[in-house]
Amino acid sequence: MSGLLVVGSSQAGVSLATSLRALGHEGPITLLGDERHRPYQRPALSKEWLQGTVTSESLLFRSDSYWPEHGIDLVKGERVIRVDKADDGSGVAHSMSGAQFAFDRLALAVGARPRRLVMEGTDLPGVLYLRNADDALELKARLPDVRDVVVIGGGFIGIEAAASLTTLGRSVTLVEAAPRLVARAVGEQTSAHLLEHHRSTGIEVLLGTSVRRITARSDHVGGVELADGRVLPADLVLVGVGVVPNTGLAESIGLNCADGVLVDETAVASDGHTMAIGDCANQPNPMPGAPPGDRVRFESVNNAIEQAKVAAYAITGRREEYAGIPWFWSNQGAVKLQIAGLSTGHDRTLVRRDAGKGKQSVLYYRGERLLAADCINSPLDFLAVKAALSKGLAIPFVAAADPAVQLKAVTQPAPVPVGTAR
């Protein structure tokens, strides 16, 4: 029996396999990963694991015994390079080692890869990316010989790693080409708060600054030359300039792709059989009231879990839609940023701030309708907004303006029904 082949053993792939077993699915499942490590959680690599506050063992999703006990064939260290697929969705996947894996149905949970810098010096020893366990192990192994670090990229990975490295006593300069931090994910007020905080911890943050090349010192990275000619000393350069969804396999078997593998509400791709979930999948916007035809690709643990559940239901013959509201988090030293909802299309913002406690929440509205919130060290605000969005409730702009008032206390039924059109 061939059963389901899940290509990719990170959060999305693991969640699909375990969700199917939780739903009582008894068919064969093969969970195939290209790393030699047991399936593990990645978010902590740039934070708690790098800082040494959690162990490698604590990052593992399941015990060794879980997989055979639940009839899941876990295969490590096999990279699929070709798939032969029939019209009914069945086929055979071929790995780089020559191994073959037959399937009745294929699920792609292949994630994304780091976007690479194209410039002189990127191949020097000491120029690193941080996406998987091997990247993190190399970074940690090099740290004893490192004093000066340059982080290229002011997104979540770059900032999280910069904060961790500062905590570990390294001198860190963060270079971001955009005019503000995390510009793709948060609003201006949140970016400004993050900038102020990280500069206060000793990180030198250079915004609106381009890198010309990476320079060498004795066949090792030695510095980063900026567009203005300034050279930043560097014993190590960490690049975090975004990711690119892995669509090569999907494209090779004729699936429609555009910033990810295009899937429907049940995570089914354009051939009507293959599934794609997690960072590699481009799906209909699950936010209530999203414009028809609007599509999104999320890079988050929450999305990987929720989309995997949707896919698991579809495999068992039930149609279930994406549960809850998209949400994200980022731990950056003393800053815990939590984001609920999507702020796209907002026309006004409300800032709730308690400077003495380092708290700030930015609520995004379209007219009177709450769309999203960025919450820094404000878990109660985050939970209130997430609950209101999930239940179609309202948090009136005027009532939320007083930061001393708990948002949960002013949550009320929405004045008009919230549609779910896509």
Image (spheres, grey):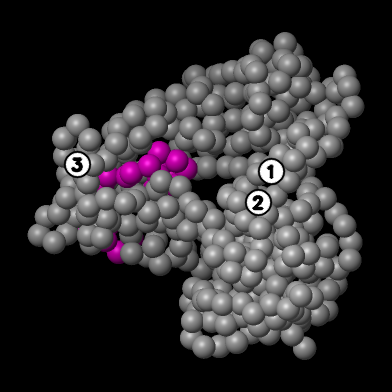
Q: What's the amino acid at mark 1? A: Arg
- Residue placed under numbered mark 3 in the picture: 225
Foreground pick, 95 / 379: 95
Q: What's the amino acid at mark 3? A: Glu
Q: What's the amino acid at mark 2? A: Asn
Q: Earlier in the sequence, mark 1 or mark 3?
A: 3
Foreground pick, 320 / 393: 320
Image quarter where the N terminus lies is: bottom right
Q: CA distance from mark 2 to mark 1?
A: 7 Å
Asked if the residue under mark 1 is in contact with the one under mark 2, i.e. CB atoms within 8 Å, the reply is yes
Q: Is residue 157 above or below residue 154?
A: below
- Residue placed under numbered mark 2 in the picture: 282
Asked if the residue under mark 3 is in contact with the one under mark 2, i.e. CB atoms within 8 Å, the reply is no
Foreground pick, 257 / 276: 257
The secondary structure type at the circle numbered 3 is: strand
Magenta segment, which residues?
A: 140-161
**Mark 2 Cα-neighbour bin, 10 Å: few <14, some 14–19, many ≥20:** many
Q: Is residue 373 left or right of residue 356?
A: right
Does any portion of residue 168 appear in the rendered image? yes
- Does the magenta portion include 170? no
- Does the magenta portion include 149? yes
